[in-house]
Amino acid sequence: MVRVLRASNSYVIADEGGWLPGCFVSEAGARRAGEALSCQQLRAIQDRKNAEAGGVGGVIEDADVDEALERQSPAPAAARRG
């Protein structure tokens, strides 16, 4: 189960194992990412967004989540996190 929490001007996600990588523009995008993407995928997206923002402070947009979901295999994220 994924929990989505508001943090300042963005949303963050956690599951049974703790905090997952990423700061998200929308609650819906955060929830979809947390339920469908692996920690590695989330970290890669956040690293890219931070680089685009000059090193830190990047925020993952819904379009970033959509793009990652289109590229991934159909295996559930929970199985990949194991």
Image: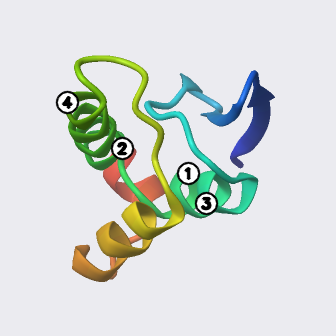
Crowding near the residue tagged with mark 1, few <14, some 14–19, many ≥20 C-alpha atoms within 10 Å = many
Disc on res. 51:
4
Q: Earlier in the sequence, mark 2 or mark 1?
A: 1
Q: Nearer the viewer, mark 1 or mark 4?
A: 4
Q: Nearer the viewer, mark 2 or mark 4?
A: 4
| Residues at circles 2 and 1 in contact by the CB criterion of under 8 Å | yes
Disc on res. 34:
1
Disc on res. 29:
3
**Residue that numbered label 2 is attached to:** 42
Look at the numbered disc 1 and give the secondary structure of its residue: helix
Toward the viewer: 8 or 67? 8
Q: Nearer the viewer, mark 3 or mark 4?
A: 4
Residue at 57% x, 23% y is 19
Which residue type carries mark 1?
A: Gly
- Does residue 58 appear to the left or right of 32 in the view shown? left
Determine whether 74 is above or below 63 in the image: below
- Does residue 23 appear to the left or right of 74 in the view shown? right
| Residues at circles 3 and 1 in contact by the CB criterion of under 8 Å | no
